[in-house]
Amino acid sequence: MQKVIDNALIYVKEIFEKEYSGHDYFHTLRVYKTATSIAIKEKANLQVVQIAALLHDIDDRKLSPLTHKNKDNARKFLLNNGVSLQVINQICDIIEEVSYKGVNCESVTSIESACVQDADRLDALGAIGIARAFAYGGANNRVMHNPEIEPKLNMNVKEYRAHISTTINHFYEKLFNLKDLMNTSTAKAIAKEREEYMKDYIARFNAEWQGEK
Ligand code: ADP
Ligand code: NI
C-alpha cells in the first residue's frame, strides 16, 4: 500500500497543478497530514485513511462534475495501482461521505471516514480557512462583503448548493457550523481554537469596516 500512497502523491500534484480556488494540491497535502495524525490517535486503518485523504477531491462535484457520481478518477487510479475492488469501494465510500452537505447531513459510517472528513473540514478553519474562503470568493466572482445581504442560517443541502452569497456570509452559513460537526475529539479541540481565531478576525474586519480601528 505504501507504493499506492507514493503514486497518489504524484498523481494529485499533477491533477491540481492549475487549480487555485482553494482546492489545490497543498490543500490535499494538508488534509493528508491532518488525517494521518487524527487516524493514529483514533486507531483507524492508517493506509485507507491516507489514500482516501489524497484522493478526496479528485472527483469533487465542483471541480470534476462528470466523474463525481461514480468517482471515476479515484476508481481508475486505484485499479491501475492493483488495489482490490473491496478496498476501492471502501475508499470511494469515504470520499462520498467527506463532502459538506448542509447542517442536517447524515453522519459518517466508519472511523476512517470520520478522520478524513474532520481533516478536510479543519482545513476550512483557522488562518488557512480564512484565506481559502477569500480565494474561493475571488475565483467565483463573489463579493467580499455586503452588509445589506444577510447570512442565511441552517440551510439544508439543496438550499446551500443553490445559495449565492458573500464571502463574509459564508463564515456564518458554513464555517461556524463546522466545529459542532466534527466527529473525533481530536478534531473538536483543534476546531474550537481555530473558530475562536476566526471570530476574532471577523470582529476586527467589522471594526475596520465601520472605521472603528
Ligand atoms: P468541501 O471541502 O466540503 O468540498 P467546499 O468545496 O464547499 O468544501 O469548500 C472548499 C473551500 O472553499 C473551503 O475552504 C470553503 O470555506 C470555501 N468555500 C466554499 N464555498 C464558499 C463560498 N460560498 N464562499 C467562500 N468560500 C467558500
Ligand atoms: Ni477538500
Image (cartoon, rainbow, N blue to C red):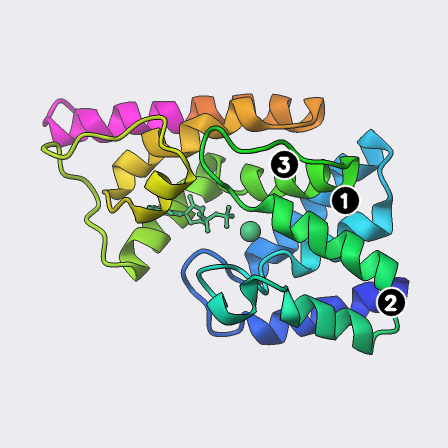
What amino acid is labelled 3 in the image? Answer: Asp
The secondary element bearing badge 3 is classed as: helix
Q: Between 74 and 200, which is closer to the camera in this rendering?
A: 74
Quadrant location of the N terminus in the rendered image: bottom right
- Looking at marks 3 and 1 on the same chain, the residue that comes earlier in the sequence is marked by 1
Q: Which residue is mark 2?
A: 83
Chief secondary structure of the magenta portion: helix
Q: Which residues are magenta?
A: 198-213
Residue visible at 37% across and 24% down in the picture: 199
Nearer the observer: mark 2 or 3; the answer is 2
- Looking at marks 2 and 1 on the same chain, the residue that comes earlier in the sequence is marked by 1
Residue visible at 45% across and 38% down in the picture: 127
Q: Is residue 162 above or below residue 86?
A: above
Q: Which residue is mark 1?
A: 36
Percent x, y of residue 172? 33, 29
Mark number displayed over residue 118 = 3
Residue visible at 89% across and 65% down in the picture: 84
Percent x, y of residue 13? 62, 71
Q: Are marks 2 and 1 in contact (CB under 8 Å)?
A: no
Nearer the observer: mark 3 or 1; the answer is 3
What amino acid is labelled 1 in the image? Answer: Thr
What amino acid is labelled 2 in the image? Answer: Val
Is residue 19 within the magenta segment? Answer: no
